[in-house]
Amino acid sequence: EDQVTQSPEALRLQEGESSSLNCSYTVSGLRGLFWYRQDPGKGPEFLFTLYSAGEEKEKERLKATLTKKESFLHITAPKPEDSATYLCAVQAGDTNAGKSTFGDGTTLTVKP
Amino acid sequence: ETGVTQSPTHLIKTRGQQVTLRCSSQSGHNTVSWYQQALGQGPQFIFQYYREEENGRGNFPPRFSGLQFPNYSSELNVNALELDDSALYLCASSQPGQGSEQYFGPGTRLTVT
């Protein structure tokens, strides 16, 4: 069974204090690893897709990286508006087409 | 480009009742997935529809059922509601195939009393 574990559960940073969020996964045949941002009471917002180990994607202050067992979301010089829950999800190459397995997220709070 | 929309925004039902939630997919997307998200947890996959057929299902009982229409909009139906069905129900649209990112709607908050 596919599993996704995110750590830490919660992270509090000062504005400008860089850090990383971790996503460890166990999957049979990775088809894609996804990062989403979710604000309270809203649906997840797509950030990145990573397909193979060694791949990296960047968007503003965020950079996502992928290895064979985990992914990191690096946040450089965060701002208060980066406060949100960040979700990691995987899609596997099994018969359940289109199913994304999500972790429980890391809730990031950035203080000014 | 029109994003994913869901209705209603909030809903309160009594245990044992039935509920229908609705979703309109993003323009150009013909695949719709439904997820249940309990407070403090990640979304759990319920099922996916492609070309009006169920195309994958998670560990949810048969009282969770769905439909997809020719315009790619979709419905989620839940019969015999239980207290544990209280959650945020999310609809996501995507292009067909594995490895495609999903675009989520704002969700429907269902409370079962």
Image (cartoon, coloured by chain):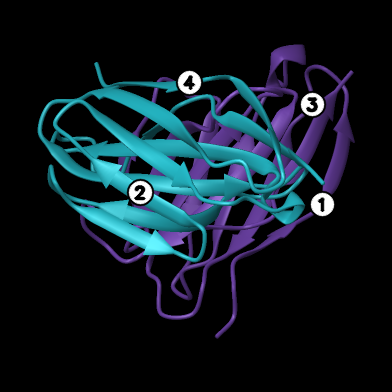
Chain colours: A cyan, B purple
Q: Residue at x 71, y 24 (%)?
A: B39
Same-subunit check for callouts 1 and 3: yes
Query: Which one is closest to the eye, mark 4 or mark 3?
Result: 4
In the rendering, which numbered label is found on residue A7?
A: 4
Residue for badge 2: A64
For disc 4, the chain is: A
B101 horizontally vs B22: left or right: left
State the residue lying farthest toward the front: A16
Element type where label 4 sits in the image: strand
Same-subunit check for callouts 4 and 3: no
Q: Amino acid at mark 3?
A: Gln
A18 or A37, nearer to the observer: A18
Mark 4 vs 2: CB contact within 8 A: no
In the image, residue A87 above or below residue A16: above
In the image, residue A40 above or below residue A50: above
- Mark 4 Cα shell of 10 Å, populated few (<14), some (14-19), many (≥20): some
Residue for badge 3: B17
Tell me the CA gap for discs 4 and 3. 38 Å
Q: Amino acid at mark 1?
A: Thr
Q: Amino acid at mark 4?
A: Ser
Element type where label 2 sits in the image: strand
B111 or A20, nearer to the observer: A20
In the rendering, which numbered label is found on residue B9?
A: 1
A34 horizontally vs B83: left or right: left
Residue A103, located in which quarter of the rendered image?
Answer: top left
Q: Choose the circle earlier in sequence order: 1 or 3.
A: 1
